[in-house]
Image (tube, coloured by chain):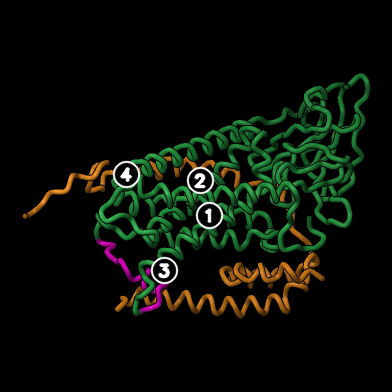
Amino acid sequence: MSANYKPVIWNRSKQVYDAILLAGVIGYILIYTRLGPFLQPAIPPLDEQTLAMQAFGSCAFILLTLVLSIGPLARLDPRFLPLLYNRRHFGVLTCAVAAAHGAKVLGWYFAFSSIPPTLAVLAADTSYGQLHGFPFIPFGIAAFVILLVLAATSHDFWLAFLTPPVWKALHMTVYLAYALIILHVALGYLQATANPIFAIVVTLSCGSLVGLHLAAGLRERTRDFARPDPAAQAPWVVVATVDAIAEGRAIVVSLNDAERVAIFRHAGRLSAVTNLCAHQNGPLGEGRIVDGCITCPWHGYQYRFEDGCAPAPYKERLATYRLLLDGRRVLLDPHPNPPGTSVEPIPITESAG
Amino acid sequence: MPGAVPSLIHDAMLAYAAIGGIVALAFLLIGLDRIDPAAAGAYAFRPLLIPGLMLLWPVAIVCWVRRQGSGGRGTSMRRRHRSAHLRIWIALAVVLPAILLAAMSLRQNGPTEAAPIRLSD
């Protein structure tokens, strides 16, 4: 967490995750470079450099599609949450594979240029005035720059330095990178290849990704439209019945378009905190109580049930909310307390629980 | 010879990276310990910050100046990116298929390569 920065945090599950990722990438590159000549028969046969270039490029595209699928999949089905825990390493690996693709391009097409290869790649094709053969490399470069910025700012330091809203906004530019990569592929390789396999893969990947994000986004929107009813006495609002909250879990209540509250039940008591984890704004209400602490489902950040403070030596704090029981109904004061304010959890009485 | 615009872009990128290198060095030597208590005594992670500082040095300078004297971390309870997410993907649901369709229609060959024709013996 935040007591002191470490270069990379690895635990057993992250090591397994990274090992599987790495093995997957190496396996893909090997298979592509071996099978490529059979899938794209050409005279003369494709050289090894071109095959490697294609292998890294297509691998980066598939990795980016997968990494962008993890978020909506985890929102739609919690069984995908373990994929989310190490998504950062996934993203950094995607950038590394994209860099390998770029290095292969520079090393093959521009290695013997009389000008620096990085300048040659910019100057190679400037036919912007025509649709046929429109330059596709700049789209790839722009997408790579975005991936590089995201990989370079993936360390927790940047999250704290830029603040979570700015960091999150910056990292949402990955969607722009994806659109640029689609342009890069559509105006580049898809124009050249006679093999329909890659066109089918790109179209299916793109369609699935759009479908997943729309499904997850629309589901969130439906949830956000449900507002709690005001109680008889202001400022309280009725948020749930006690029975609706499972032990060790939470329900999430939307107070407005952007503010959500997670109400947890633990050891016969109820407590409410903001739904946003102080780390990466993860959805705390989708997490659970572990060792008496509210635990974020994204990266395992923990907060005390009673005051929303991370246990020492960590320093993150959450805004807390007041709760009240009215029979079996749970009432919430929608005005947040300053982060870290202690609010005694309310006991669930026999009549209520 | 490369055109004037590519050369200009290339030179600008090099200059940007060079300034970024200077800012990164200054930040890691002077700024980091003053603005982030979690960096105290942690040195191994610092080289990892160099690429980000070189890429985002104008933003880094702004954040550096703003955070001088305040070691606290901002907290937010509002998640505005959630509604932005849906809007972005509605737009992409239109843009991405349009790109792919346009690209397919631009192709000069069909889905399979035409058989080669011998022009002369």
Q: Mark on residue A107?
A: 3
Image-based side of A162 in relation to A60, left or right:
right
Q: Which residue is drawn at 84% across and 50% down?
A: A310
- At label 4, which amino acid type do we have? Asn
Indicate the chain on which mark 3 is placed: A
Report whether residue B28 is seen: yes
Image-based side of B90 in relation to B118, left or right:
right
Q: Position of residue A254 (x, y in %)?
A: 69, 36
Q: Quadrant of residue B32?
A: bottom right
Report whether residue B78 is seen: no
Indicate the chain on which mark 4 is placed: A
- At label 1, which amino acid type do we have? Thr
Relative to A327, is B28 above or below? below
Q: How far apart are marks 4 and 2 (CA)?
A: 21 Å
**Do dots 4 and 2 share one subunit?**
yes
Label 4: state its secondary structure. loop
Query: Which of the two discs, 2 and 3, labels the residue nearer the N terminus?
Result: 2
Query: Which of the two discs, 1 and 4, labels the residue nearer the N terminus?
Result: 1
- At label 3, which amino acid type do we have? Gly
Q: Mark on residue A173?
A: 1
